[in-house]
Amino acid sequence: MSTPIVMVAGSANLDFVVRAAHIPAPGETVLGSEFRTFPGGKGANQAIACARAGGVQTQMLLALGEDSFAVPLEASLREAGVGLHIVRCADVPTGTAFICVSDEAENAITVAPGANACLAPQHLPALAGVSHLLLQLETPLASVTAYARAARAAGVTVVLNAAPAAALPPELLAAVDLLVVNEGELAAISGIAGDVDAALATMRVPNVVVTLGARGARARCAQAQFVQAGFDVAAVDTTAAGDTFCGVLVAALAGGSAWPQALRQACAAAALACTQPGAQASIPRHDEVIAFLNTQPV
């Protein structure tokens, strides 16, 4: 049997990260401490999480500028073994994100899309051999919709991480097989806040996963429901925890894992990502996830 191929189409950003005692309120200036840059972007983070999860081939469609910011992004993806389909955008800077991380490991993020906004419908490569297409919302919504519809027509399983939260056109949702959201995103899409069950009931998507932060995740798959508790870790930085969850979940499902096993691995990987600083730098390898799970009660 051939190795499954997961295609990720999405964003790549260079993250500028500063740590501070707390995230500034509007109009407030806070003195930070450590400053570092890290490769990031939801699409690139998820591609690396998928590749490090093992068991699948991972490819990525992304757009980069012709500048120095693109260099570490491309290098990080290649080092993780991700096959790249790069759209080069002249006179447009590579995407960036400005992140403040508090001493409580919470973060506030502002993204300047840059080259990510250049991804167009015609840029989607051939999907021959691809089993799953993983999408997010840091690239143009029209392109995301076009990619989802093309993948659906080709018989590819379409996974959408609807982040950052945005109103989703019906034609996009109609092409989605698996929707992954956090509680805030679920509320934004459904219009129902504070009641996950009621919000899930409104989702006309075959499979929906809701991430619950430290509390784990819930899944509604056709008529089945699954709950995975979170794992207790000493959190340092929650950046890319959700992206890690998405990449590992899709890799596990593409590799043939049952829903309970896939959710457990994804939650464990996301928890481990919170124990290290940075986005892609924090994403664990498959052997690290398994070693961690071996220390946890079943």
Image: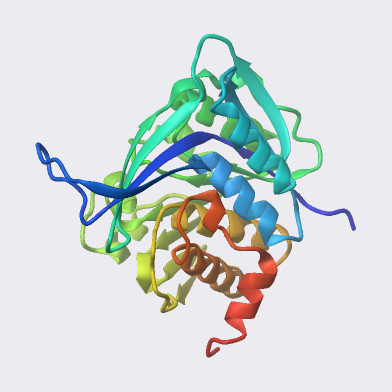
Residue farthest toward the bottom in the current orientation of the protein: 297
Residue drawn at x 45%, y 57% as measured from the top left? 277
Residue drawn at x 20%, y 46% as measured from the top left? 31
The quarter of the displayed image where residue 105 is located: bottom left
Q: In which quarter of the image is the C terminus?
A: bottom right
In this view, the residue in front, 74 or 256, is 74
Total marks shown come to: 0
Q: Position of residue 94 (x, y in %)?
A: 51, 24
Q: Position of residue 41 (x, y in %)?
A: 49, 39
Asked if residue 187 lies left or right of residue 122, the reply is left
Q: Quadrant of the N terminus?
A: bottom right
Residue farthest toward the left in the current orientation of the protein: 27
In this view, the residue in front, 149 or 7, is 7
Give the colouring mode of the picture. rainbow
Residue 71 lies, with reference to residue 46, above or below; the image says: above
* Residue 82 in view of the camera: no
In this view, the residue in front, 159 or 38, is 38
* Residue 227 in view of the camera: yes
Asked if residue 114 lies left or right of residue 3, the reply is left
Residue 210 lies, with reference to residue 94, above or below; the image says: below
The quarter of the displayed image where residue 89 is located: top right
Residue 51 lies, with reference to residue 236, above or below; the image says: above
Q: Position of residue 135 (x, y in %)?
A: 54, 40
Residue drawn at x 70%, y 57% as measured from the top left? 254
Q: Where is residue 100 in the image (x, y as percent from the top left)?
A: 30, 46
Residue farthest toward the right in the current orientation of the protein: 1
